Image (cartoon, rainbow, N blue to C red):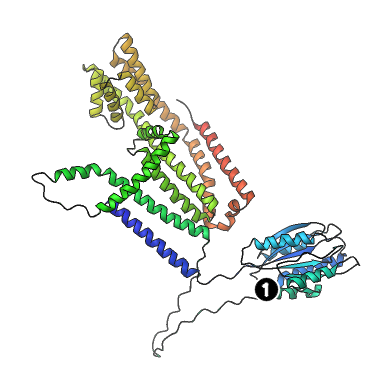
Amino acid sequence: MSVIRAGRVVAALAAVAAVAFGAGVARATTSSPAPTRAVMILLDVNITFPAADAAAENAAATAYLNALPVDVRAGLITFYGSWNQVAPPTTDRATVSAALSSASRVGSRSIGLAPALAAAQSALSALGPSVDGRVVVLSDAEELTGPVPASSIPVDVVTWAFESDDNVSSLQSLAAASGGRAVAPADAATLASGFPAVTPSPAPVPSVAPRPHHAEPASSPPPVSASWRFSAPVLAAVGALVIAIIALVIVVSGLSSSGRRGRQLVAQVAQYGPSHAARRPEDGAAQGSSHRKVAGAAIGLAERALEVRGTNRTLAARLEVAGMTIRPAEFVVLGACGSLVLAAGLTILVGNFLIGVPAGLLAGWLCMRLLVSLRMGRRRAAFGEQLPDVLQLIASSLQSGFSLAQALDAVVREGSQPAAAEFARALGEARIGADLADALDGVGARMDSQDMRWSVMAIRIQRSVGGNLAEVLRNTIATMRERAFLRRHVKALSAEGRLSAYILVALPILLGGWLFYSSRSYMQLLYTTTFGLMMLSGAIVLVVVGAFWMRALIKVEV
């Protein structure tokens, strides 16, 4: 199957997947989920409470907490002259109970009720727009002057009165104005009726047709799977992923079509040959031309961007050293499409748009640079390994009576890549007027080969002072091979250190990935809280610094 047809198939599958996904989401969202239910307990911890009544206040709060349905989230705020959120809304009753029992008595007034009430409303509003929330206040209103600000959330109160400056009437007015109730400490548990228990609806029983008495018993119906839940950022990320995949397929098919243009021209010319039978044009010519137009537009934008930044020549030189025949603009377009796919995929995986998009784009850019750097390193390493054999062939040709240019031509004809391609380029530059030594210097610069630079230096010296160039090259070859032997020996001795460095760098990354896969809620704190983001950033910096440090320790220059 051609690349264009494969691109059309993949694009069609992606579109079908998007439609099916949207239909699944529509079916899953027909039944809206139940709203989140939560309560904030406001506990007065001023020191005017006698010891016995302070214990009774904690007992009343604990009784109310235990009477709540299991799905109701409960949080705790303590107040006196000021306020403090001790526990955010959670379904973990043990956490809130421990916070209640450990609340210490401070301050001598209850004037912090108003800001504590505002903080409770903010905590409940942060759970979502459809939250079903309430507030429960346990206080003696010590020196609470004036009316308490009205609340948009129902407020239930449990009151005590010890002295004449206890403004209990303000708490009772607050409960009546907000639609709550005011009860005695002994009846605190009855306030949990504000959250009626939710009984699960019975699953529909499938109708079974009557069957004979001797028939085998029917198998139990398959369990009903739970409905999916998707947030708006995740849905947007899924759509972006589908669009990015389609764009990548179109660009790749367009580039492949433009690469086959030469072969298509040859085929068109061959149609007029005497022995050529009539052929039908390709069925996908129109689709291929449209793909080429889209790819051409994207490449044109990339070329203009590279020219503005002045990186076109630099990227072209890197691609040339890496042995990649693709143009810089084409490489940038493919990398941008891949980065979009990574960004959308990470957004779906993490569930956070602000983290997934920057991380995906950065990962795509790093992968592009890493791909080119790896190809450059491999090609340069292969050139370094082939150089002694190439110089040996040149020395033998010189000893046979060939000139240096003829010896290089023998290398081009009989050598292997990448040495043959590099020397062919140098020989071509010399044939159009460049100095041969300068052209060979260019080979050493492109391949970053110190051995090649030394060889060119030997050629320059021989051309200046005379001498046997073949013998000079043989001595140079012997030095190269001894250095290569020593380099391999050092590499073998440092293998343990390099392996330790690889393990130490990869271990936190692999462990973090496994924990993210197996315990998502445990790892979410690293990218959903400020302190977690600081810890994650610090860990990344330390891993990078440690990697460079270990690289410097195990790198031995030969």
Image quarter hosting the C terminus: top left
The location of residue 336, given as percent across then percent down, is 42, 45
Residue 108 position in % (x across, y down): 87, 59
Extreme residue in the bottom direction: 213
Name the residue rendered at 30%, 46% in the picture: 256
Q: Is residue 141 visible?
A: yes
Q: Is residue 373 visible?
A: no
- Quarter of the view holding residue 188: bottom right
In this rendering, would 172 be left or right of 311? right
Give the image location of residue 168, x and y in percent.
84, 69
Residue type indicated by callout 1: Phe
Q: Front-most of 13 and 465? A: 13
Q: Is residue 340 left or right of residue 162?
A: left
Query: Which element carries disc 1, helix, strand or loop?
Result: loop
Of 166 and 294, nearer the camera is 294
Q: Quadrant of residue 476?
A: top left
- In the image: residue 18, left or right of residue 284: right
Toward the right, the furthest residue is 164
Question: Disc 1 designates what residue?
Answer: 195
Instruction: Give the camera-side residue of 477 and 10.
Output: 10
